[in-house]
């Protein structure tokens, strides 16, 4: 590097220091937006940490601290929360006004408002990030054009990919904002219904009564026959609104789905992280060293792949039954680990081609003869080319992981009750599909189809954006195998 | 490198892969947190425990001062025994599901149903998926293409277990829903339960009592169809997509252009030049399909109550019959690897480019 080059190439920090206004405004608005929902963010973090600590085999250190952190998180004022916009209330008289709901609105309207506001908030947040990217391009980036611009432009005109992106965002928001989006809290409605009380207007006695949530649940069941059904978009006798109806045990299906999304997303992301790490390291080293290293990874990868993944999962769940590892996130961590450790060969094979291709480029050869360390060559000169492909196949494999997790829970060996998991809802609703309580099994299935299709579409979109020449062929073969994954 | 040398290389590679895969299974079954002997005898039966443990090769009985003591067999010794047993095709016996029965007998009892299921699901997927994909590829960007492509994508995204559950419910209530009863259609059968495969084990029946045999064949086919459609669903979607792209790619290639310029009839181009080449990328999909079937059969057999190999694996794993699980895993791995070899073999025969790129 010469001195003149240094003068031309200023770091991003310097560039921001020279022109502070746009960046400052953008960060200020972002902080304000985040501050509105700070409570929800802290709550999510605390829930994750709590799950880790709960299953720790050597006592529960700091559990009290976490409990107090949770209480503190709930105390942080949050704009879009059940406290600000409550939807659970009761009538004071027959057909009288509602109390305890937001502005005295009917529970359905209050819940809808909160639901719509949450998605509007996320929409604004995403819009703000896109605006930030534009600001960066206008004010801070030195080059007028980079290849990334073309990738972004191609993705923006790829409607199938955009469809996937939107549905994936909807799904992720479900997982992150589960307590806000649900008409009831999982803790109160699903996990410990007999520890919480609620009030309702009893038409027979003509007064406001107090019952345990569990009691109310047991009188709002959906079991097909006769009056025993709370279907889509209905109220139960206790003034509670159920957007997706209730489950056979009277619990709210919508709440179940939102929290279930959390479980699916956690397992999906964690296993994807493990797979991605293995696949990246192996793709880089095999492409760089070739020969024996490649052969060794081929053998190990093929051995892992020769055991059907679902069978491996069943076996692992059976063998680790009751083990402390199975206790973390009710088996979620174990499932994610098995998916990650058994799924990397597929991902690695998918990116092996591009990695080999880039390893034959002249600049890699130049870096090598230049005396650059292999790890630096891989990271700086090979990895950027492969990352896009990794994203594509990770997105497509994620659908398979979601299906696999649901299948395990359907078989009764995945996520333990009462923690919600979509597959369990299908298994609970199975006897009632042909009755008026069809919603219990149908809705989770439709959601899985939508989410998996969306992840595939997103993968398609990214692939077409980074590599417009690739019309299927080899790449699609692998992706196709990844998508259906067993369950 | 010649093509056959390439194939031979792949064949030799299969050996370490098999050994390594079995080692993984050994690690889970023997070195995992679940003691196989404990799982078999259940809790609190020390005497029975030692008998089973000795039989499994986990412990060894030694006499010390005329008294029987039990010593743990080291893990490496267990590993050698385990691998030696499998490689000499000594699969041992089942302990919990079918006590005192050899694994071979258990498999002989269960395998026909799974094979029957697998056969039909491959067949259905092939005969629906490939024609649809080729149709979409030959008529790109028409409504037919869009419908087929979108249908394929959604169809592939459907979880097998959900599809199976819906299908069972719909068929069980076909009388109310469609006005005809699936159970009574052609041959009376149940929606769930295993098909009667008497005609497979006793093919002579087709000569001695053809009426009954054909009736049984019809019944067994009808009973397996819904399960086979579910099991083949994801492969069907894959075959459709790959078929479509393959046709699109070949149809735009230079030799097809040349043939067209020479005046070869459109019919001959499609059948002779496009289809045959478009089939090449479908080979891995078809073999991968068989692989998907092994995993998927667990779910489908569970829901349709077909007591085949998949269900056997599931119950064996959940009921703690780990010796049976290990042997079944060996069979499945062997099956997968043979399919891989078959795939390489087909490639070697069909695709002249094989082995070229390795140079």
Image: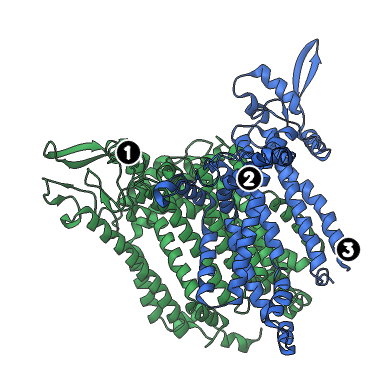
Chain colours: A green, B blue
**In the foreground, B22 or A441:** A441
How much space separates mark 2 and mark 3, taking CA atoms?
Answer: 34 Å
Secondary structure under the numbered disc 2 in the rendered image: helix
In the image: residue B309, left or right of residue B255: left
Instruction: Identify the residue shown where x is 20% and y is 52%.
Output: A101
- Compared across the picture, whether A22 is left or right of A233 comes to right
Same chain check for tags 2 and 3 = no
Q: Position of residue B70 (x, y in %)?
A: 74, 20
Residue labelled with disc 2? A311
| Front in this rendered view, residue A295 or A226 | A226
Q: Identify the image quadrant of residue B132.
A: bottom right
Q: Are marks 1 and 2 in contact (CB under 8 Å)?
A: no
Front one among B167 and A186? B167
Chain holding disc 3? B
> Which residue is under mark 1?
A193
**Chain identifier of the residue bearing label 2 in the image:** A
């Amino acid at each position: 590097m010469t001195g003149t080059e240094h003068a031309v190439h200023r770091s991003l920090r310097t560039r921001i220091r020279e022109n502070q206004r746009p960046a400052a405004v953008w960060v200020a608005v972002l902080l304000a937006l985040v501050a509105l929902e700070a409570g929800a963010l802290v709550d999510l973090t605390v829930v994750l940490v709590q799950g880790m600590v709960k299953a720790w085999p050597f006592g529960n250190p700091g559990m009290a601290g976490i409990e107090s952190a949770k209480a503190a998180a709930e105390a942080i004022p949050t704009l879009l929360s059940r406290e600000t916009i409550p939807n659970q209330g009761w009538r004071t008289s027959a057909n009288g006004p509602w109390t305890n709901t937001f502005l005295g609105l009917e529970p359905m309207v209050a819940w809808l408002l909160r639901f719509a506001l949450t998605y509007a908030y996320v929409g604004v947040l995403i819009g703000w990030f896109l605006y930030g990217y534009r600001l960066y391009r206008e004010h801070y980036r030195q080059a007028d054009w980079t290849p990334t611009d073309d990738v972004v432009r191609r993705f923006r005109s790829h409607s199938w990919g955009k469809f996937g992106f939107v549905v994936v965002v909807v799904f992720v928001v479900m997982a992150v904002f589960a307590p806000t989006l649900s008409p009831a809290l999982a803790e109160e409605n699903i996990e410990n219904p007999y520890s919480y009380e609620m009030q309702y207007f009893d038409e027979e006695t003509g007064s406001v009564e107090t019952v345990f949530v569990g009691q109310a649940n047991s009188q709002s069941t959906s079991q097909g026959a006769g009056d025993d059904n709370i279907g889509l978009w209905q109220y139960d006798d206790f003034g509670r609104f159920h957007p997706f109806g209730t489950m056979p045990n009277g619990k709210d299906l919508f709440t179940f789905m939102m929290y279930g999304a959390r479980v699916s997303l956690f397992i999906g992301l964690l296993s994807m992280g493990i797979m991605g790490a293995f696949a990246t390291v192996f793709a880089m080293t095999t492409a760089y060293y070739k020969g024996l290293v490649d052969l060794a990874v081929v053998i190990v990868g093929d051995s892992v792949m020769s055991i059907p993944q679902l069978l491996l999962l069943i076996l692992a769940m059976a063998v680790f039954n009751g083990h402390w590892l199975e206790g973390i996130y009710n088996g979620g961590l174990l499932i994610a680990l098995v998916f990650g450790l058994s799924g990397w060969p597929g991902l690695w094979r998918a990116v092996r081609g591009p990695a080999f291709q880039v390893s034959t480029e002249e600049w890699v050869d130049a870096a090598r003869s230049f005396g650059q360390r292999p790890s630096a060559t891989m990271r700086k000169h090979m990895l950027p080319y492969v990352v896009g492909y990794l994203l594509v196949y990770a997105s497509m494999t994620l659908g398979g992981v979601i299906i696999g997790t649901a299948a395990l829970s359907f078989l009764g060996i995945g996520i333990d009750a009462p923690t919600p998991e979509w597959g369990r809802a299908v298994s609970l609703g199975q006897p009632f599909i042909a009755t008026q309580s069809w919603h219990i099994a149908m809705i989770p299935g439709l959601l899985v189809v939508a989410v998996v299709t969306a992840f595939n579409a997103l993968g398609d979109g990214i692939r077409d954006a980074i590599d417009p020449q690739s019309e299927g062929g080899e790449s699609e073969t692998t992706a196709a195998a990844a998508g259906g994954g067993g369950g | 490198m010649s093509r056959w040398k390439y194939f031979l290389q792949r064949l030799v590679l299969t050996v370490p892969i098999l050994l390594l895969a079995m080692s993984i299974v050994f690690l889970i079954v023997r070195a995992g947190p679940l003691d196989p002997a404990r799982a078999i005898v259940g809790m609190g039966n020390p005497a029975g425990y030692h008998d089973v443990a000795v039989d499994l090769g986990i412990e060894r009985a030694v006499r010390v001062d005329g008294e029987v003591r039990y010593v743990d067999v080291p893990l490496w010794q267990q590993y050698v025994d385990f691998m030696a047993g499998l490689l000499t095709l000594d699969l041992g016996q089942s302990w919990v599901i079918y006590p005192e029965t050899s694994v071979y007998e258990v498999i002989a009892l269960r395998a026909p149903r799974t094979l029957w299921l697998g056969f039909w699901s491959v067949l259905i997927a092939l005969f629906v998926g490939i024609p649809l994909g080729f149709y979409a590829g030959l008529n790109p960007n028409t409504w037919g293409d869009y419908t087929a492509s979108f249908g394929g994508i959604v169809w592939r995204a459907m979880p097998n277990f959900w599809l199976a559950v819906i299908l069972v419910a719909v068929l069980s209530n076909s009388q109310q829903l469609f006005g005809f009863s699936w159970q009574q259609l052609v041959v009376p059968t149940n929606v769930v339960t295993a098909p009667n495969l008497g005609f497979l084990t006793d093919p002579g029946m087709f000569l001695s009592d053809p009426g009954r045999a054909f009736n049984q064949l019809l019944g067994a086919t009808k009973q397996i169809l819904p399960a086979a459609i579910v099991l083949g669903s994801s492969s069907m979607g894959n075959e459709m997509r790959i078929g479509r792209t393959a046709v699109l790619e070949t149809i735009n290639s230079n030799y097809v252009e040349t043939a067209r310029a020479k005046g070869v009839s459109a019919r001959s181009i499609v059948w002779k030049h496009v289809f045959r080449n478009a089939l090449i990328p479908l080979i891995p999909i078809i073999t991968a399909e068989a692989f998907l079937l092994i995993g998927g059969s667990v779910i489908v057999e569970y829901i349709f109550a077909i007591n085949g190999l998949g269900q056997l694996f599931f119950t064996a794993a959940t009921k703690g019959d780990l010796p049976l699980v290990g042997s079944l895993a060996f069979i499945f791995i062997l099956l997968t690897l043979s399919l891989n070899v078959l795939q390489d073999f087909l490639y070697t025969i069909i695709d002249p480019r094989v082995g070229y790129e390795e140079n």
